[in-house]
Image (cartoon, rainbow, N blue to C red):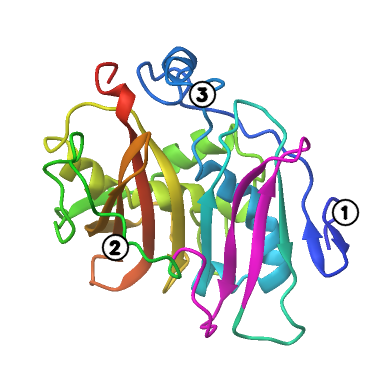
Amino acid sequence: MRDDIVLKEGRLYGPWRQPSNPHKHLTRSIHDDTTAQNLGFRGGTVAGNIHFEMLAPLLLQAFGPRWFERGTLSIDFKFATLDREDVRGVIDMPPEGATDAQVAVIMERPTGEVVGIGTASAGSPAAATALAAKDLSKYDAGEYTILKDVHPGDTFPIEPVAITRKAMDERMQVITEPLPWYAGDSPWGGAIATPTVAVHAMTAAQTAFLADRRPRAVGLYGAIELRLVNGPVFVDRPYVTSGKVVARGQSPKTEYIWYESHLEDNDGKRIAEMLMQLRFVKGSAPLG
């Protein structure tokens, strides 16, 4: 076990890390201090998927390299962090010898706020993931403004995606947990993508789909589930991504969609899948 990971009463505690906000220069976004504060946030937020990288060493300790082949990470985000704020991951250890197991995951602040909560798994456990257990259909009611032209069942275009070495090198400059497999050889023969980068690759089709279907509004990630089906996701290998809207809903402050997307290689082999809740702040349309 790594010296900076602590096993206590069946739980693995990662070190405190300070994830950066690499998008803080994007004005009129949730990552920009001025825009975020105008919408009632403390400041420009760190994207939720960036925290996924912080959990990778804990997932390796709990499940071994197999997590990058057939693993899941399913997180509901509860508290938005700012640039360089302390966050740590905590996950339960699976039963000894289990090949198909799911455990609880939490990301927390030293001041007690829960940044994200959910599950992680490897193999094919019987229990549903944290997000798969949600009833996504029960909130599609009322009038929509931001998402009036988006409906459950809408499909995304097929988009080519490439996780380039250059993009990974840029990510390595700010990553909190730079595993050597991200930069060079891995047990699978080549460099692999971080969980954060794998999630980002599967947003390309959604971005293209929404480009002309909504008023400009400030968006943020509400929840993400990453599923590695035939992983890992490799660097410098061509993929395509697509997906569809599975649910739509709203809260007093946001309108949101849940969508499924996937990543396939050029032979049509399914490599990874994702379930995401993408929120748009109702008060932000004039700002977007």
Label whose residue precedes the other's in the sequence (3 or 2): 3
Q: Badge 3 is on which residue? A: 41
- Cα distance between the residues tagged 3 and 2: 28 Å
Which of 47 and 169 lies nearest the eye of the viewer? 47
Disc 3 crowd rating (10 Å Cα; few below 14, some 14-19, many 20+) is: some
Say what amino acid the circle numbered 3 marks. Answer: Phe
Q: Position of residue 75 (x, y in %)?
A: 53, 56
Label whose residue precedes the other's in the sequence (1 or 3): 1
Residue 197 located within the stretch drawn in magenta: no
Q: Badge 1 is on which residue? A: 3
Going 37% across and 50% down the picture, which residue do you hit? 277
Examine the image and state in which quarter residue 164 appears.
top left
Segment colored magenta: 102-131
Mark 1 or 3, closer to the camera: 3
Which of 254 and 37 lies nearest the eye of the viewer? 254
Classify residue 99 as left or right of residue 198. Answer: right
Q: Position of residue 57 (x, y in %)?
A: 69, 57
Going 48% across and 21% down the picture, which residue do you hit? 40
SS for tag 1? loop
